[in-house]
Image (cartoon, rainbow, N blue to C red):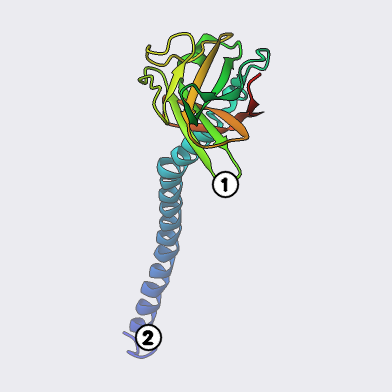
């Protein structure tokens, strides 16, 4: 037969080890391939939708660049005057126009935000379609119909709003609010506010 130390037994053990080494490299290669497939699947399932959603959200305001602007054609608007009978309150009159655009773009708009800036403070006022008009302090109403719920200018249209407050402001900013809840603050327009003539 053979020597137990160097004969058949040793040769058989060597063959078994050699076979196991061959199987180990195949298993390692298959394992690496499976790991690669799993990593790619995770990227496709989680990372791709995350990036796509963030890109959609970050570009959602591009169509609304300067959609709303202050219409400066009207001399008696885009200014303030003291409220009759109450010298503490001011009426800020702002003519807001919507640029001519595709109807689909206008349908995505919920309203706009007005930001008033003064020496010591700023105030943001939300103006949304259907809001109740108010002539009280802090309220907003439309000049042509003071009692009607708030309307938002359609493409090519201008509406004048009045904001009632006891604070003094020197300029105002306007930007778009979308129905999706996104505020497009990078799509704004500014105007200086002075006393009405």
x and y percentages locating residue 49 in the rendered image: 44, 38
Which numbered circle lies on residue 61? Answer: none
Query: For numbered disc 1, what is the local secondary structure?
Result: loop
The residue at 56%/9% (across/down) is: 157
Which numbered circle lies on residue 120? Answer: 1
Query: For numbered disc 2, what is the local secondary structure?
Result: loop
Up-down relation of residue 1 to residue 194 (above or below):
below
Q: Crowding at label 1, few (<14), some or many (≥20) Cα neighbours within 10 Å?
A: few
Q: Quadrant of residue 140?
A: top left
Nearer the N terminus, badge 2 or badge 1?
A: 2
Q: Crowding at label 2, few (<14), some or many (≥20) Cα neighbours within 10 Å?
A: few
Q: In front here: 58 or 5?
A: 58
Q: Is residue 86 left or right of residue 80?
A: left
The residue at 39%/68% (across/down) is: 19
x and y percentages locating residue 75 in the rendered image: 67, 15
Q: Quadrant of the C terminus?
A: top right
The residue at 40%/78% (across/down) is: 14
Q: Is residue 141 left or right of residue 184?
A: left
x and y percentages locating residue 37 in the rendered image: 43, 48
Q: Quadrant of residue 6?
A: bottom left
Up-down relation of residue 56 to residue 160 (above or below):
below
**What residue is disc 2 on?**
7
Q: In front here: 142 or 81?
A: 81
Q: Is residue 89 left or right of residue 99?
A: left
x and y percentages locating residue 110 in the rendered image: 43, 22
Q: Quadrant of the N terminus?
A: bottom left
């Amino acid at each position: 037969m053979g020597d137990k130390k160097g004969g058949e037994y040793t040769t058989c053990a060597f063959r078994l080890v050699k076979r196991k080494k061959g199987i180990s490299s195949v298993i390692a290669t298959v394992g690496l391939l499976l790991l690669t497939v799993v990593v790619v699947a995770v990227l496709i399932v989680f990372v791709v939708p995350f990036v796509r959603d963030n890109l959609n959200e970050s570009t959602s305001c591009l169509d609304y660049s300067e959609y709303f602007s202050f219409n400066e054609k009207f001399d008696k608007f885009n200014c303030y005057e003291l409220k009759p009978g109450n010298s503490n309150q001011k009426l800020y009159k702002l003519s807001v126009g919507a640029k001519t655009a595709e109807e689909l773009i206008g349908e995505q708009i919920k309203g706009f935000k007005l930001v008033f800036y003064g020496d010591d403070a700023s105030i943001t006022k939300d103006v949304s379609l259907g809001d109740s008009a108010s002539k009280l302090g802090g309220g907003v109403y439309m000049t042509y119909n003071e009692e009607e719920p708030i309307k938002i200018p359609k493409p090519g249209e201008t509406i004048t709003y009045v904001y009632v407050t006891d604070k003094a402001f020197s300029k105002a900013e306007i930007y778009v609010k979308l129905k999706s809840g996104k505020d497009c603050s990078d799509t704004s327009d500014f105007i200086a506010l002075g006393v009405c003539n």
